[in-house]
Image (tube, helix red, strand yellow):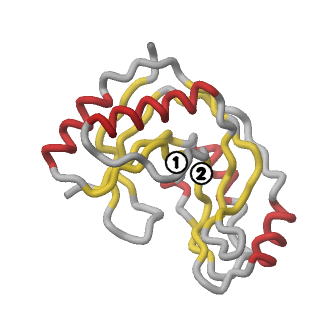
Amino acid sequence: MPRLFTGLEIPAEIGMRLSLLRGGLRNARWIEPENYHITLRFIGDIDDRLAYEVVDALGRIHRDPIEIHLDGLGAFGKDKPHSIHARVEPTPALVELQGEQERIIQRLGLPAERRKFTPHMTVCRLRGGTSPADVANWLAMRGDFQAPAFTAGRFVLFSSKTSTGGGPYVIEETYPLAA
């Protein structure tokens, strides 16, 4: 059974900028730059028949390329921080693309995503023992991260191995954004 999700790739030069932020935080498992992405819809572990239906249904999406703006750094998990991410501006085009994918996946019989879509790119995952104060200090020193905007000309169907997250990810299918 493949574990699938859709996302947007990050240009190598932005991945390089983000990789320079690595370090200085205990119990952090840093994501490798080649695995940076913006998740649009986690699909999960599904059988091959449903995977083929997903591939086909996503191919019916016709949208224009999307300009992506990274807007600083943040953390998820206030009292028990579990990850640090680069914030992504939730532009209407990005939110609409994610919403269309959500509707398609639900029409195929998969459950709705439980969490509200918060566009971001995970930089590291935190294990127990990383205090909110440690995260706040790390963010205070690096939180004003800026990168040039970029245009996403396609979205991707990724697969991953069952693990604790963070890659490696395999591109299973690509879908151009060119209405």
* Residue 108's disc number: none
Q: Position of residue 95 (x, y in %)?
A: 57, 32
- Check the image and report above or below for 20 versus 117: below
Q: Quadrant of the N terminus?
A: bottom left
Judge from the rendering whether residue 116 lies leftward or rightward of residue 170; answer left or right: right
- Check the image and report above or below for 46 versus 26: above
* Residue 37's disc number: 1
Say which residue label 2 marks.
121
Taking the spot 44% from the left edge, 13% from the top edge, the residue there is 179
- Find numbered disc 2 in the image and state the secondary structure of the residue it sits on: strand
User: Which is more toward the observer, 32 or 65?
Assistant: 65
Real-space CA distance between mark 2 and mark 1, rounded to the nearest whole angstrom: 6 Å
Circle 1 Cα neighbour tier, 10 Å, few/some/many (<14 / 14–19 / ≥20): many
Please identify the residue farthest to the top as the structure is shown: 179
- Asked which quadrant contains residue 59, the reply is top left
Q: Where is residue 47 in the image (x, y as percent from the top left)?
A: 17, 52
Judge from the rendering whether residue 59 lies leftward or rightward of residue 63; answer left or right: left
Circle 2 Cα neighbour tier, 10 Å, few/some/many (<14 / 14–19 / ≥20): many
Please identify the residue farthest to the bottom as the structure is shown: 129
Amino acid at the residue labelled 1: His
Taking the spot 68% from the left edge, 66% from the top edge, the residue there is 22
Q: Are marks 2 and 1 in contact (CB under 8 Å)?
A: yes
- Asked which quadrant contains residue 44, the reply is bottom left
Q: Where is residue 110 in the image (x, y as percent from the top left)?
A: 29, 46
Taking the spot 86% from the left edge, 64% from the top edge, the residue there is 140
- Find numbered disc 1 in the image and state the secondary structure of the residue it sits on: strand
Q: Position of residue 176 (x, y in %)?
A: 41, 24
Judge from the rendering whether residue 155 lies leftward or rightward of residue 59; answer left or right: right
